[in-house]
Image: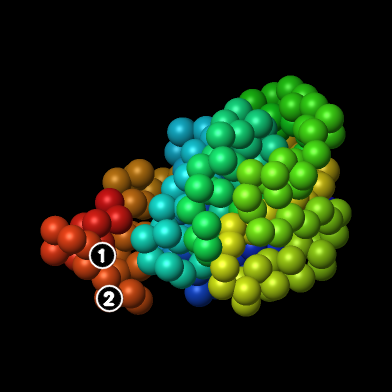
Amino acid sequence: MNRLDILRVAIEAGSTAPIVFTTGHTCREAYQLADRPNHFYMVGSMGMSAAIGLGMAWRTRRPALVVDGDGSLLMNPSVLFLAAGFPGAPLIHLVADNGSHASTGGQPTDSDFFDLEAIALATGYVSAVRTDTAAGVAAALETALANGGGPHFVRAHIAATPGAAAGRLTMTPARNATRISQWLADRINLTNRSGMSTAEGLR
């Protein structure tokens, strides 16, 4: 199983939910596989994809899927504590673990030294699953999306592929942010205390 396998499963499972793709080759490959209005691509801000997904899940009270990487998560493990601080937030935090910083040259992350599932559970995630098959990822995502509560943690071991052929995004970050905000606004009629529309409040 490689990163493309994970991305295909995530895109299919999250067809009706916002999906946040972490920075580097993950977001580039997702963009090339299937660019959809419910996709948000990280450009920089390594380690913050789960925080962005959490904001979407908490604000809308609807499931939000994050496709993270082991390097990104270990760069900023505080996102586990942040997510657990919002009990019931329907966040599905999928970590594609290839044991390396594949987007920057393949430097090892030593992720195998850490029981990330146990850490997630200890910080307050309501479930944590580990799998090394695409079918296992699909089943875990289906269960988490159907559950409605959260946050949920899914760790998928994948091969360390460099993704050298993945081109950079042609969409600007501003356009990306506006599009996902509008996609959410079109589906959920929410206003915050200041009376802003969903699209305004989520920017």
Whether residue 50 sits left or right of residue 96 in the image: it is: left
- What residue lies at 52% left-to-right and 33% top-to-bottom? 46
Numbered label attached to residue 198: 1
The answer to whether the residues at label 2 and label 1 have Cβ atoms under 8 Å apart is yes
Q: Position of residue 17 (x, y in %)?
A: 50, 69
The amino acid type, in three-letter code, at marker 1 is Thr
The residue tagged with tag 2: helix, strand or loop? loop
Q: Is residue 19 visible?
A: no
**Image position of 174 with respect to 139: above or below:** above
Left or right of 142? Residue 19 is: left
Q: State the image quarter where residue 33 is shown.
A: bottom right
Q: Residue at x 70, y 49 (%)?
A: 121
Report the side of 44 relative to 72 (left or right): left
Residue behind mark 2: 189
Pointer 2 or 1: first along the chain = 2
Q: Position of residue 77 (x, y in %)?
A: 61, 34
**Where does residue 185 sit, x and y in percent of width and height?**
29, 69
Could you tell me which residue is drawn at 56 percent across and 49 percent down?
84
